[in-house]
């Protein structure tokens, strides 16, 4: 049975309700029992002093690969749920490119069981759009929805042709499933590893042009008009694609988008030293793209910030730059990188927290991302002024592949509660 807990003296920020005030938060039976005054007859079993800290809904991460099943040499659900809890994340959306592929209810149930055993985060499983992610035959979306998938995706795998994509969007729409699209035309990307521009040309690295993203976005937008499907564009990297989405939103298209936290800070200039930690997919773009993505987030064109967490074993980053595996480990940097946007004036604190709580929850249709009384008590408590360094002592993910290693970041989680249960508490030492 979940303990009764009072989180006292904290600055409560709940973007979903527009709350920003010094309030106590009371928890009973795993749910928010009240804000401010104690509910009648409430006696806390545990008190958390949140003085000088911010209390907000638990973070909702729209894209994190936990590597299990199939890639346990990189990470496991247990190891990455520890890292997620340390990052204040209470809900993680998992793409379908595990092994086996998440294209049957059996695999969905396996992941749900593993998550329940770890007992630290809620996992929202995204099912496969096509069987085996091969891009040809449609998956059994009805069965996946019944198993708990609210969304489907083909992850990085291409769909065979536009007819298959149209049928997939129609089928998903008939089951009220969100389709998550990672927009990249495989032919235009042509196995590139960096942004196609002066930096990549100077380094002699094959580039991925803007068109790889914009063409993929345009193709899906054209099919939405015919199918009425709800689509979420995941991990945008370019200003041009973002502006196409903005125009479609103005026309009333049922679409949303997110951006990975690192895309809001890093640029293609970072690859100058051939450091494989900057080998990412989609690639880092220009400063102009980075700044435009920040504007899109502020203006609401981009709904959410995600970690795009992709933990790797050390060997995956030890070859020549093009031969290394793309991706970074980002669960514990999601919150501080988002807060850094407040420091730079790109976002208000309310906007920043909305981008990792209320808005991603709304994209996935989840009962999360709010501190409204009666909802599950998924809560993050963090010190916005705490400075910490990424090191072996502070890092919990099995993947050490982050370009921010040894960097000092501001903003650190001190407590995380999932369903009213404390799942992380920072060692005060």
Image (cartoon, grey):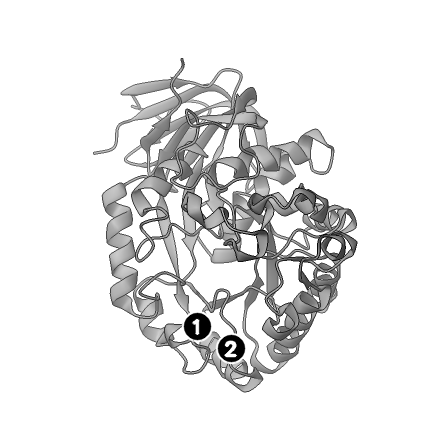
Q: What x and y, as percent, mark residue 153?
A: 47, 67
Q: CA distance from mark 1 to mark 2?
A: 9 Å
Decide if residue 411 is on the left or right side of residue 113.
right
Of the residues under marks 1 and 2, which one precedes in the sequence?
Answer: 1
Image depth: mark 1 or mark 2 in front: 2
Residue named by callout 1: 129
The quadrant in which the N terminus is found is top left
The quadrant in which the C terminus is found is top left
Q: What x and y, as percent, mark residue 297?
A: 68, 48
> How many circles with numbers are drawn on the protein?
2
Q: Residue 40: which quarter of the image? A: top left
Rendered view: 249 above or below 343:
below
Residue at 63% over, 68% down: 189
Residue 309 seen by the camera: no
Q: Secondary structure at mark 1?
A: loop
Q: Residue 226: which quarter of the image? A: bottom right
Q: What x and y, as percent, mark residue 351?
A: 64, 40
Q: Residue 174: which quarter of the image? A: bottom left
Rendered view: 54 above or below 241:
above
Q: Secondary structure at mark 2?
A: loop
Residue at 58% over, 52% down: 321
Residue named by callout 2: 159
Between 254 and 397, the one lying in front of the other is 397
Residue at 31% over, 58% down: 70
Rendered view: 314 above or below 366:
above
Q: What x and y, as percent, mark residue 130?
A: 42, 76
Q: Check contact, mark 1 vs mark 2: CB within 8 A.
A: yes
């Amino acid at each position: 049975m979940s303990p009764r807990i009072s989180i006292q003296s904290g600055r409560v920020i709940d973007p979903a309700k527009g709350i920003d005030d010094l309030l106590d938060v009371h928890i009973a039976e795993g749910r928010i029992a009240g804000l401010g005054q104690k509910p009648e007859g409430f006696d806390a079993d545990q008190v958390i002093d949140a003085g000088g800290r911010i209390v907000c809904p638990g973070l909702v991460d729209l894209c994190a690969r936990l590597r299990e099943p199939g890639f346990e040499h990189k990470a496991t659900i247990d190891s990455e749920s520890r890292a997620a809890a340390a990052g204040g994340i209470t809900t993680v959306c998992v793409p379908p490119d595990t092994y086996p592929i998440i294209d049957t209810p059996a695999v969905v149930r396996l992941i749900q069981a593993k998550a329940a055993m770890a007992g630290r985060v809620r996992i929202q499983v995204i099912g496969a759009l096509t069987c085996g992610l091969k891009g040809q035959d449609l998956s059994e979306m009805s069965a996946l929805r019944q198993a708990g998938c609210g969304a489907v995706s083909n992850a990085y795998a291409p769909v065979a042709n536009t007819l298959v994509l149209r049928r997939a969007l129609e089928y998903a729409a008939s089951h009220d499933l969100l389709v998550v699209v990672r927009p990249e035309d495989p032919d235009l990307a042509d196995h590139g590893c960096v942004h196609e521009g002066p930096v990549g040309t100077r380094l002699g690295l094959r580039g991925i042009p803007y068109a790889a993203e914009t063409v993929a976005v345009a193709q899906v937008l054209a099919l939405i008009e015919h199918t009425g499907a709800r689509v979420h564009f995941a991990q945008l990297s370019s200003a041009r694609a973002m502006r196409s989405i903005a125009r479609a939103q103005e026309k009333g298209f049922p679409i949303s988008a997110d951006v990975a936290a690192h895309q809001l800070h890093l640029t293609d200039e970072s690859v100058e030293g051939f450091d494989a930690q900057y080998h990412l997919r989609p690639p880092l773009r220009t400063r102009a793209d980075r700044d435009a993505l920040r504007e899109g987030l502020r203006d609401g064109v981009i709904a959410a910030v995600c970690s795009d967490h992709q933990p790797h074993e050390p060997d995956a980053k030890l070859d020549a730059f093009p031969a290394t595996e793309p991706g970074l480990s980002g669960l514990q940097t999601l919150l501080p990188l988002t807060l850094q946007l407040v420091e730079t004036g790109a976002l208000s604190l309310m906007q920043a927290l909305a981008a990792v709580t209320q808005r991603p929850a709304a994209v996935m249709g989840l009962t999360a991302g709010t501190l409204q009384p009666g909802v599950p008590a998924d809560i993050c408590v963090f010190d916005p002024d705490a400075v910490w360094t990424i090191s072996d002592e502070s890092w919990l993910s099995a993947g050490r592949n982050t370009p921010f290693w040894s960097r000092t970041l501001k903003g650190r989680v001190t407590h995380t509660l999932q369903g009213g249960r404390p799942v992380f508490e920072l060692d005060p030492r």
